[in-house]
Image (cartoon, grey):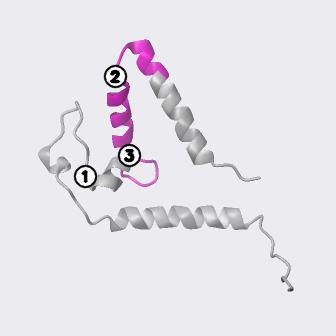
Amino acid sequence: PQSNGKAENAVRTIKRLFTKCRESNCSEFLALLDWRNTPTEGLGSSPAQRFFGRHCKTLLPAHGVLLSPKYPMERDTQAINRQKQRQQHYYDKHSRSLKQLTP
């Protein structure tokens, strides 16, 4: 059986993030915003960048150029497609052909 590892990993990460926020008495919303602004490994852009086309404004100082939209996301799209192809390759390694269905 296949499981949704990405979703489970995201839930685990957020639970850990919220636990650390409660221990240090920080805002969960700001921590979540910072987590969304953190670049994804292998893609070089954050989920917020891919969704909004720019960095989101946080408490960390950022140059105004980073906050303006940049819509050409071809490099990110290509990286996501390569990642999907790699996942499909490894998924298909253990698949087998189905028998022909007869009516």
State the separation of the CA atoms marked 1 and 3: 12 Å
Left or right: 65 as drawn, with respect to 85: left
Q: Which residues are magenta?
A: 19-45
**Whether residue 46 can be seen here:** no
Question: Which of label 2 and label 1 is nearer to you?
Answer: 2
Relative side of 78 to 8, left or right: left
Of the numbered discs 2 and 1, the one sitting upstream in the chain is 2
Query: Which numbered marker is on residue 39?
Result: 3
**Residue 33: where, in percent of width, then height?**
33, 36
| Depicted 32 relative to depicted 63: above or below | above
20 is higher (above) or lower (below) than 83: above
| Kind of residue sitting beneath label 1 | Arg
Examine the rendered structure and indicate whether residue 100 appears above or below residue 94.
below
User: Label 1 crowding class (10 Å Cα cut-off): few <14, some 14-19, many 20+?
Assistant: many
Give the residue type at disc 3.
Answer: Pro
How far apart are the two marked residues, 2 and 3, measured between alpha carbons?
A: 21 Å
Instruction: Please tell me which residue is depicted at 38% across the width and 25% down the height of the picture.
Output: 28
